[in-house]
Amino acid sequence: MALYPASERSQPAVVAHTKWAISVRIFHWLGALLLLITWAMIKLDANAIDDTYIDLHKAFGLSVLFWTVARLLNRVLTLKSIPAKVVMPKWQTGIVHLTQLLLYVCMLAMPLTAFTAEMMKGNVVWFFGMEIPAFIGENRDVARTLMKLHKDVFWTMLLAFTGLHILGALQHQFIKKDNLIKRML
């Protein structure tokens, strides 16, 4: 005789936690720091006399790509230790999921478009002292289009959805007062 009804046995065991797994929190905050450093490097490059800052921008940008891929893998591996769902209307849950999805799209698309554009210009990309030679055929027209996407589309989207993400977290913390932010600290 079974100890639990069949309906309970067939469900995967998911334990409700009050916080995200430590690995998820580390990926979240270090990812945010990587994005800030990448942005700072492009700002510093505006008045630079050599390629140091743009090379660092590219290296940190590639780091964002690798970090995001690792973050997504970690997210899959930690599915059984997610915090309990926050009570909110379905339309808000939909906005949360869409915002998070589009943030991930931007964190993948921004470095991919820039890296591919550099390759299509025939340029070497420096990754913290390691040279990555162009391995994609040269096509300057496509490279210009990719850089336009990188700068005008994905950067704008990243700013918009990051702002929405932060506003949502602040709304939960200070208006709803449900301590949502604590789950990521």
Image: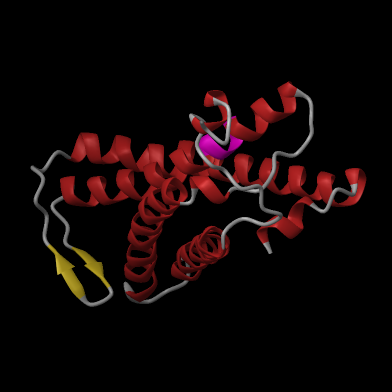
Q: Is residue 58 above or below residue 52?
A: above
Q: In this view, does 35 lie above or below 131?
A: above
Q: Does the magenta stretch include residue 69?
A: no
Quadrant including the C terminus: bottom right
Report the side of 180 relative to 159 (left or right).
right
Residue under the point 56% across and 51% down: 81
Q: Is residue 99 magenta?
A: yes
Judging depth in this view, the residue of 69 and 146 nearest the camera is: 69
Q: Is residue 25 above or below residue 151?
A: below
- Can you tell which quarter of the image residue 32 is in? bottom right
Q: In this view, does 54 lie above or below 100?
A: below
Q: Position of residue 34 (x, y in %)?
A: 48, 65
Report the side of 113 relative to 175 (left or right).
left
The residue range painted magenta reads 98-102
Q: Where is residue 80 in the image (x, y as percent from the top left)?
A: 52, 46
Q: Position of residue 99 (x, y in %)?
A: 60, 35
Residue under the point 67% across and 53% down: 17
Report the side of 156 relative to 126 (left or right).
right
Residue under the point 89% across and 43% down: 176
Residue under the point 72% across and 22% down: 91
Judging depth in this view, the residue of 111 and 94 nearest the camera is: 94
